[in-house]
Image: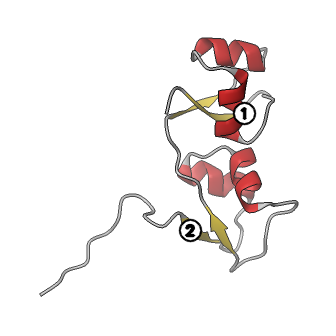
Amino acid sequence: MCTLEACKRNPFGLYRVQRGDTLRSVCARFSLPPALVAAKNGLRAFPPEGSILLLPEAAGETYLVRPGETLVSVCKKFCMTEEEFSARNGCSYVYPMQLVLVGKE
């Protein structure tokens, strides 16, 4: 007999947009940078309820950018090049309260 167990992680990397969701709320739930999810899905606007989003696997740890930090200072803090940062986060900029992926994969 087979039994089903709840998954702790999303094994397929898919998410169905629910009523009231925003890019920020979905990304916060899965600890993903919004720019990365937007880039992965080619988003120009958040999709309507019922749409399926592809969620990239978050390798590494997330970091919340603090006021006064720059791309260079964040990269230096986590021993990353700007190219590595850009590839991991889908953007080449930082701003206060932005959630980004840092560290080595």
Residue 18 found in image quarter: bottom right
Left or right: where 91 falls relative to 50: right
Residue kind at label 1, given as amino acid type: Ser
**14 lies left or right of 70:** left
Crowd band around label 2 with a 10 angstrom C-alpha radius: few (<14), some (14–19), many (20+): few
Tell me what residue is drawn at x 70 percent, y 56 percent: 40
Name the residue tied to disc 2: 14
Q: Is residue 40 visible?
A: yes
The relative height of residue 92 versus residue 69 in the rendered view (above or below) is below
Among numbered discs 1 and 2, the one appearing first in the sequence:
2
Q: Is residue 69 visible?
A: no
Residue at point 66%, 43% (across, down): 33
Residue at 78%, 38% in the rendered image: 91
Q: Is residue 73 left or right of residue 4?
A: right
**Residue lying furthest front in this view?**
83
Q: Quadrant of the N terminus?
A: bottom left
Type of amino acid at the residue the image marks with label 2? Leu
Image position, residue 95 (x, y; %): 80, 28
Residue placed furthest toward the left: 1
Image location (x, y in percent) of residue 49: 72, 77
In the visual, does 67 lie left or right of 62? right
Image spot of residue 105 (x, y percent): 49, 33
Write down the residue under mark 1: 86
Q: For residue 18, which numbered disc appears in the image?
A: none
